[in-house]
Image (cartoon, rainbow, N blue to C red):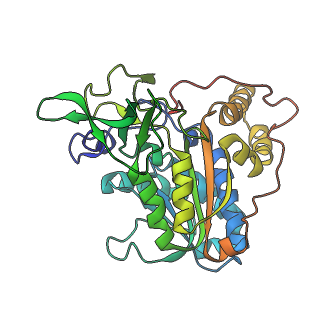
């Protein structure tokens, strides 16, 4: 999985033609509407204020995709901060330097007074106060697959020499008691990422947005491939040309965060988080500013998609340092998510093409 996704030549996420706006294999929430980034920016502002509104504030976005989310956050922060924006910095961190540079080029024109950059190759681990954002990053960590049979766990893996999938018994004390037929995926790197930021984020907010069951995967396999907005038939088919991802094991991530010293401020659905961060208030003027009726309808539908089209997405908010000692990071007051009297109402089916299982 590591090779298929991240090989320098031929890996899925190192492809120069990879897109995140619906024109490829999937789309992410920032591609739906700028409101997503604006709401995240409001969450960052709430944390910054509770930290005492320091003159210097550093934000790091992990896995910035094509730079759309960064651009939306930067523009909104610039509008809301005024002169204080000059003390902010925003860094785009990606394991692929080429992808980070592409995101930088897309977002650079929207940074305004905020210093936009890439993390330095030396000193990147220097502790700092600020905020870290990871939107749909944890699901893309390579994972190990296990199945319970006969009272023990077996790991499913690829025998590269033989070119086939096979399995072997394993002894991992960190796995739950095996229940016959249960399947489990463990992305050790995802929990490791959380632990690593506990050492670097001395005071601030770690914001994790991703998909997965609040209580785990329910003993079923979630790893799947995605290509052309459709689930693939074979995980091993055409490596490097299809997305591979699995539900985030949020119980494991939350436990790792607690052990690392983070304070869990909130864990809830993405729709609940966006609502609390002011999506409704942000949506009303955005819809009203639509230049024509067709665009207004499109914007209504975009808001509905953000609220109902990502049903398996969760948000985990973690605090460190002085922010944790303050006991909570108050989000903006909860507001109704309905963007207006004639805004979207009722439920909705998940939109195709999301990486939502």
Residue furthest top in the image? 233
Residue furthest bottom in the image? 55
Residue shown at 62%/48% (left/top)?
Answer: 315
How many discs appear? 0
The image quadrant that residue 147 belongs to is: top left
Query: Could you say which is closer to the camera, residue 249 or residue 26?
Result: 249
Direction from residue 262 to residue 191 in the image, left or right = left
The image quadrant that residue 56 belongs to is: bottom right
Horizontal and vertical percent position of residue 263: 63, 65
Residue shown at 73%/69% (left/top)?
Answer: 327
Query: Could you say which is closer to the camera, residue 300 or residue 271?
Result: 271
Whether residue 111 is visible to the viewer of this picture, yes or no, is no
Residue shown at 73%/44% (left/top)?
Answer: 272
Direction from residue 286 to residue 249 in the image, left or right = left
Whether residue 322 is visible to the viewer of this picture, yes or no, is yes
Q: Is residue 350 above or below residue 291?
A: above
Residue furthest right in the image? 341
Horizontal and vertical percent position of residue 29: 57, 40
The image quadrant that residue 203 belongs to is: bottom right
Horizontal and vertical percent position of residue 216: 55, 40
Q: Is residue 141 above or below residue 53?
A: above
Horizontal and vertical percent position of residue 133: 54, 57
Residue furthest front in the image? 151
Q: Image quadrant for the N terminus?
A: top left
Direction from residue 343 to residue 110 in the image, left or right = left
Query: Could you say which is closer to the camera, residue 170 or residue 318?
Result: 170
């Amino acid at each position: 999985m590591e090779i298929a996704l991240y090989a320098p030549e031929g890996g899925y996420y190192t492809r120069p033609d990879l897109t995140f706006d619906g024109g490829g294999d999937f789309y992410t929430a920032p591609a739906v509407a700028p409101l997503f980034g604006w709401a995240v920016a409001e969450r960052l502002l709430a944390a910054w204020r509770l930290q005492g509104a320091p003159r210097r504030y550093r934000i790091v976005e992990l896995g910035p995709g094509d730079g759309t989310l960064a651009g939306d956050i930067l523009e909104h922060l610039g509008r809301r901060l005024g002169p204080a924006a000059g003390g902010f910095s925003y860094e785009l961190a990606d394991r692929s330097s080429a992808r980070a540079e592409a995101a930088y080029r897309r977002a650079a024109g929207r940074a305004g007074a905020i210093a936009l950059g890439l993390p330095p190759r030396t000193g990147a681990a220097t502790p700092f106060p600020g905020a870290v954002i990871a939107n749909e990053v944890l699901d893309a960590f390579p994972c190990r697959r296990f199945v319970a049979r006969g009272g023990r766990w077996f790991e499913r893996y690829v025998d590269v020499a033989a070119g086939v999938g096979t399995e072997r018994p394993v002894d991992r004390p960190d796995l739950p008691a095996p229940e016959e037929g249960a399947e489990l995926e463990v992305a050790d790197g995802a929990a490791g990422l959380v632990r690593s930021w506990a050492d670097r984020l001395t005071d601030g907010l770690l914001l994790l947005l991703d998909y997965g069951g609040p209580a785990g995967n329910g003993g079923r396999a979630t790893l799947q491939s995605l290509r052309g907005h459709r689930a693939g038939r074979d995980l091993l088919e055409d490596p490097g040309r299809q997305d591979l991802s699995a539900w985030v094991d949020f119980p494991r991530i939350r436990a790792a965060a607690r052990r690392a010293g983070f304070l869990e401020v909130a864990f809830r659905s993405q729709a609940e988080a966006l609502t609390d961060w002011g999506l409704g208030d942000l949506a009303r003027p955005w819809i009203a500013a639509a230049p024509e009726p067709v665009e207004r309808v499109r914007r209504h539908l975009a808001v509905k998609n953000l609220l109902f089209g990502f049903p398996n997405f969760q948000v985990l908010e973690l605090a460190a340092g002085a922010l944790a000692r303050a006991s909570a990071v108050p989000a903006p007051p909860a507001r109704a998510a309905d963007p207006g009297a004639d805004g979207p109402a009722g439920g909705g089916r998940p939109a195709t093409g999301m990486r939502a299982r």
